Image (cartoon, grey):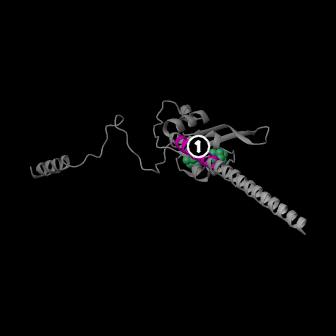
Amino acid sequence: MFGFLKGLSVTFSQMTKKKLTLQYPEVRPVWPEHFRGIHEFIPELCIVCNQCARICPTNCISLSGSRDENKKLHIDTYDINFEICILCDLCTEVCPTESILMTDQFELATYSRDDLYKDMHWLYANHVNHGSYNKLQAQKAQAEKEAQEAAAQAAKEEQVATQTATQESGNGNETADRSTKGTAADGSVATKEGGDA
Ligand code: SF4
Ligand code: SF4
């Protein structure tokens, strides 16, 4: 009897406490900032240096690239086998351009092992849907806005500088005219003086 009451007391004491469980999938968890979820990939940033594939402890990254007419390397294929990926984050740590990053996406349940082999397009879609796409777009828009503002400011300063230069040149001409007139007057006086002599 005592044990039963003791058990009930524990149950009732827990009923007033804050709930730690979520009604998943309706309510989704908010992960900490450095949560290591499924990767996102941004192809335009990749320089095909192969560092991510080299450091991967499970050899689950395979990639290939080619050079364009300017000898610049572009990524052609980028695949991660999530069947053996251990989400260790090493690939993102070594990537010099941050083209491979980790997201807070964690759902990969599937009926087929083959579905765990994700290609560049899937990883890019993960970038758009669950990754840093919106943040990057906002940064790009902000950078463009700042560049436009800087260009407008530079144009304004140039216009002011041109106006000032024009004004100064006008003043200079006026002074030169006055000085010429003065010389002419002096000259006429001199001529007169010369004539008197
Ligand atoms: S997280 Fe680790 S195991 Fe997964 S692809 Fe990157 S380096 Fe490889
Ligand atoms: S480390 Fe980064 S830049 Fe280099 S191949 Fe991997 S994803 Fe591309």
Please identify the residue farthest to the top as the structure is shown. Answer: 111
For label 1, count other residues whose C-alpha is less than 10 Å away and answer few (under 14), some (14-19) or many (20+). few
- What residue lies at 80% left-to-right and 60% top-to-bottom? 185
The count of marks equals 1
Indicate if the residue with disc 1 has its beta carbon within 8 Å of ligand 2: no
x and y percent of residue 171 in the render? 70, 55
- What residue lies at 75% left-to-right and 42% top-to-bottom? 72
- Nearer-the-camera pick, 143 or 100: 143
Q: Main secondary structure of the magenta part?
A: helix
x and y percent of residue 137 in the render? 54, 40
Quadrant holding the C terminus: bottom right
Q: Is residue 141 left or right of residue 13?
A: right
Local secondary structure at mark 1: helix
x and y percent of residue 179 in the render? 77, 60
Q: Which residues are magenta?
A: 137-155
Q: Amino acid at mark 1?
A: Glu
Q: Which residue is mark 1?
A: 144
- What residue lies at 48% left-to-right and 30% top-to-bottom? 111
Q: Is residue 1 left or right of residue 17?
A: left
x and y percent of residue 96 in the render? 63, 51
Judge whether residue 152 can be spotted in this image: yes
